[in-house]
Image (cartoon, grey):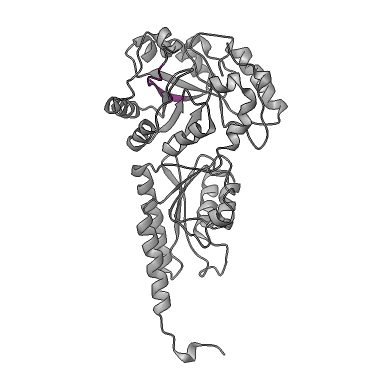
Amino acid sequence: MDPEKANPEALHFTAEAHPDYLFVGGSTGGDTTEFVRNLKLQITNHKLQIPIILFPGNADQFTTEADGILYLSLLSGTNPEYLVGQQIKSARRIHAASINTIPTAYILIDGGVETSTMKVTGTKPLDPSDLPTIIDTCIAAELMGKTAIYLEAGSGAKTPVSTDIIAAVRANTTVTLIVGGGIRTPEAMNAAYKAGADIVVIGNHFEQNPDEIERFCQKTQNIPSTPNTQNDEKYMRLALAEAEKALAANEIPIGCVIVSENQIIGRGHNLTETLADVTAHAEMQAITAATQTVGGKYIPDATLYVTVEPCPMCAGAIGWAQIKRIVYGAPDPKRGYSTYAPRVFHPKATVTAGVLEDECRTIMQEFFKAKRSCKFPISNLKS
């Protein structure tokens, strides 16, 4: 939302459909403090809690009224004023405010229009056909310590950042990936999510059509995403190690780990026989461990990795815990949540399926094959 363009009073939210965040900022100016105050009033009137994150074009747009700030560095250009100059000018005020600060690489991709950012900064966007340079820039951003990358086609872009670019950046980086510019339909938004975006930003379209917010939010239900191969395989192997523990205990070999900020906060494997408890599934064990680790019942910033598609019971628990990303290995067409309760996860949750699918399926098949081949003496059978 640009303070010079958007009207906070025109925004429409509901409890079931509202943005995860509201980004506030623009390339030129506007009264950011007053605008954020008006936004807070609208959010309160709707009885909601939506974090307001600053997306500033310069140091003057900082306000202590916001909940956080994307501490942007324009890495697609070489103008020192926007690489570090504006950051230095705002550093003392931001530090004194103790505001949640998110070091972010801002990378402009040519969207077919001359944007205000280009005019103000005197820089050119990256060529969308030059994928190696885009990937190298994003890798450099992560090596510099940025915790987020913002791929931006620009305000009013004719062409959004392509799904090929999003997927390539996702495959080569592990930080939060934000994508924006030129996205005008739920289909384009979901395509960005499926390609690997963690956050999709829609600005101009909502400024011009604020009543569209609810429709877009309702279209983000459990969007399947492209795996981040490096991290997803790493943590799925740890989930498989949990499945091996279940196998050793003659339990159905399903394992689960829960990860937050690249740290495992919960582990679990199937214990239904050991505990004589039909609810003691791997996911339930891992969720209990994770909530004890964080000291609360909600873990929205976590990713849950499980070797087999969750059943409806476990999917319900995952939804109640507000886990926003679920990764599983082998599908379960007979008992999986997608057959019985496809909307049971948190409305903004994303689902990645098929990570190490063959390995996850094989351990299950071998377990049941061994079970079927067991021969029990007649004396062990009850009449």
In the rendered view, does 326 fall on the left or right side of 165?
right
Question: Which residue is drawn at the image coordinates 48% and 55% (left, top)?
Answer: 309
- Quadrant that contains the N terminus: top right
In the rendered view, does 166 fall on the left or right side of 66?
left
Can residue 355 be found in the magenta stretch? no
Locate residue 371, reporting x and y percent: 42, 75
Question: Which residue is drawn at the image coordinates 55% and 56% (left, top)?
Answer: 339
Locate residue 244, reporting x and y percent: 38, 63
Locate residue 332, reporting x and y percent: 48, 59
Number of marks: 0
**Quadrant of the image occupied by residue 127:** top left
**Quadrant of the image occupied by residue 113:** top left
- With respect to residue 32, does 218 lie above or below? below
**Magenta-drawn stretch, dominant element (helix, strand or loop):** strand
Range drawn in magenta: 102-112
Locate residue 39, reporting x and y percent: 64, 20
Q: Residue furthest bottom?
A: 379
Pick whichever, 365 or 259, lies toward us.
365
- Quadrant that contains the C terminus: bottom right
Can residue 103 be found in the magenta stretch? yes
Question: Which residue is drawn at the image coordinates 68% and 19% (left, top)?
Answer: 9
Pick whichever, 84 or 42, lies toward us.
42
Q: Residue furthest right?
A: 45
- With respect to residue 329, does 380 lie above or below? below
Question: Which residue is drawn at the image coordinates 49% and 16% (left, top)?
Answer: 56
